[in-house]
Image: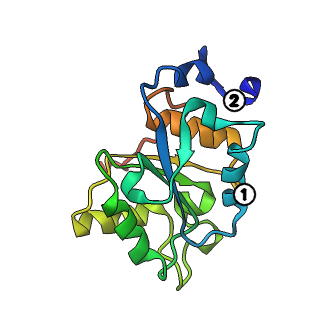
Amino acid sequence: MVEALPRNGSVDLAKAFDKLKRSIWVFHLNTGSCNGCDIEVLDVLTPYFDVERFGIKLVGSPRHADLILLTGPITIKTLDKVVRAIDAMPRPRLVLALGSCGVGGGIWFNTYSTLGGYPKLQELLKSLGVEVDKVVYVPGCPVRPEAIIYGVALLLGLAEPKVRYERVEAVEG
């Protein structure tokens, strides 16, 4: 339902998606999640939210994807596959990191079997020479379906962020 979509000020996201000139293809990659966020991704595809009416479709290969949707804390076992999937994407590479695990590693942020969240993966990707053009973090455990749709709108430039991340450095003096 259109009423269920989040609103950002006076911008109606349903109308914002009408500005798209083509469909958006999304590759969903589970990187070791508990499946809570994965279930919410499936919820976005149900008739209640029906994101396919906006042209958003899941694809089976990162080579065809406009954006990649990551769920989970990125386990050491999935790390190679994640790097290869992001590297296989055409440019511009857009990443939507979902849930507490995708954002910062969740409850597994400092365990031996996980890399942590997407920020640690981004450091690794830079060291390997794999560039990512834009990243949006959508927190929550599990993340709400409306927040997933809003995150896609942010990645595509169809909505303004409600909260901006700013790094504050301590000044000695």
Circle number at residue 5: 2
- In which quadrant of the rendered view does residue 73 lie? bottom right
Give x and y (percent) for residue 167: 40, 46
Circle number at residue 108: none
Q: Residue at left 72%, top 36%?
A: 49
Q: Residue at left 36%, top 49%?
A: 169
Q: In the picture provided, is 90 more to the left or to the right than 36?
A: left
Give x and y (percent) for residue 32: 59, 73
CA separation, marks 2 and 1? Answer: 18 Å
| SS category of the residue bearing label 2 | loop
**Residue 99 seen in this snapshot:** yes
Which residue is more in the foreground, 59 or 124? Answer: 59
Give x and y (percent) for residue 14: 62, 23
Circle number at residue 39: 1
Number of numbered tags placed on the structure image:
2
- Give, as a three-letter code, the residue at label 1: Ile
Q: Residues within 10 Å of mark 1 (few under 14, many from 20)?
A: few
Q: In the picture provided, is 4 more to the left or to the right than 123?
A: right
- Give, as a three-letter code, the residue at label 2: Leu
Q: Residue at left 58%, top 54%?
A: 98
Q: Residue at left 24%, top 69%?
A: 128
Judge whether 26 appears above or below 154 on screen. Answer: below
